[in-house]
Amino acid sequence: MTIGDNVAIIGEGAFSGCHDIFITIENPNCVIYDWGKYLFGNIDCIIYGYDNSTAKDYAERFSVFNVRFVSLMTPPENTIRNIVIPDECSDENYTEGVYNGLKYRKYSAYIAIMGYDSSFTKVIIPEQIEGLPVASIESKAFRESVL
């Protein structure tokens, strides 16, 4: 799975219970909330990311749980964006929808991914849904998935 440079937050336990997962995190400044090893599970998780990134920091902190890091080197200049990080605990009104198997919440300024249709084996997180940036992957969004 590739998490594009438009995603500013990965919520707690977003990939908990997943095994043998390979994730590329393109935003070097993505905020990664965690419960220790429970963000990505504990069996053969490989995170691809840039040097000096939050992805690298996360993988190094939890390497004891088989979370490994593979460097994509330094990010190209055009991948570093000024992204407004949404408030994950927002009380703002939202609507829910489904786009290409992704379940999401539509807030006034951004989209938050909250899950997916488990019949899909490959998930692509788009830059936008309904003209709004996909800026967050909510807590437990892909928990125990078989991606």
Image (cartoon, rainbow, N blue to C red):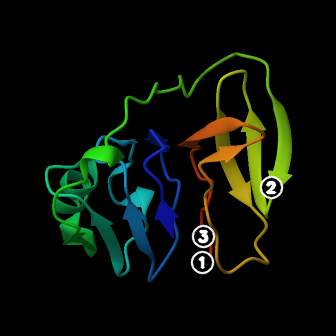
Indicate the position of residue 13 as horizontal and vertical percent values. Answer: 50, 53
Indicate the position of residue 67 as horizontal and vertical percent values. Answer: 28, 70
Which of the two residues, 86 or 11, is positioned nearer the viewer here? 86
Of label 2 and label 1, which has the lower sequence position?
A: 2
Residue at left 77%, top 52%?
103
Q: In this view, does 62 lie to the left or right of 36?
A: left
The answer to whether marks 2 and 1 mark residues whose Cβ atoms lie closer than 8 Å is no
Select label 2 or label 3 by which is in front.
2
Q: Is residue 93 left or right of residue 70?
A: right
Note whether 116 is above or below 146 in the view shown: above
Indicate the position of residue 52 as horizontal and vertical percent values. Answer: 14, 50
Select label 2 or label 1 by which is in front.
2
Q: Is residue 136 left or right of residue 20?
A: right
Q: Element at badge 1?
A: loop
**Residue 144's mark?**
3
Q: Element at badge 2?
A: strand
Q: Element at badge 3?
A: loop
Say which amino acid is labelled 1: Leu
The answer to whether marks 2 and 3 mark residues whose Cβ atoms lie closer than 8 Å is no
Residue at left 51%, top 70%?
1
The answer to whether marks 1 and 3 mark residues whose Cβ atoms lie closer than 8 Å is no
Q: Is residue 112 left or right of residue 81?
A: right
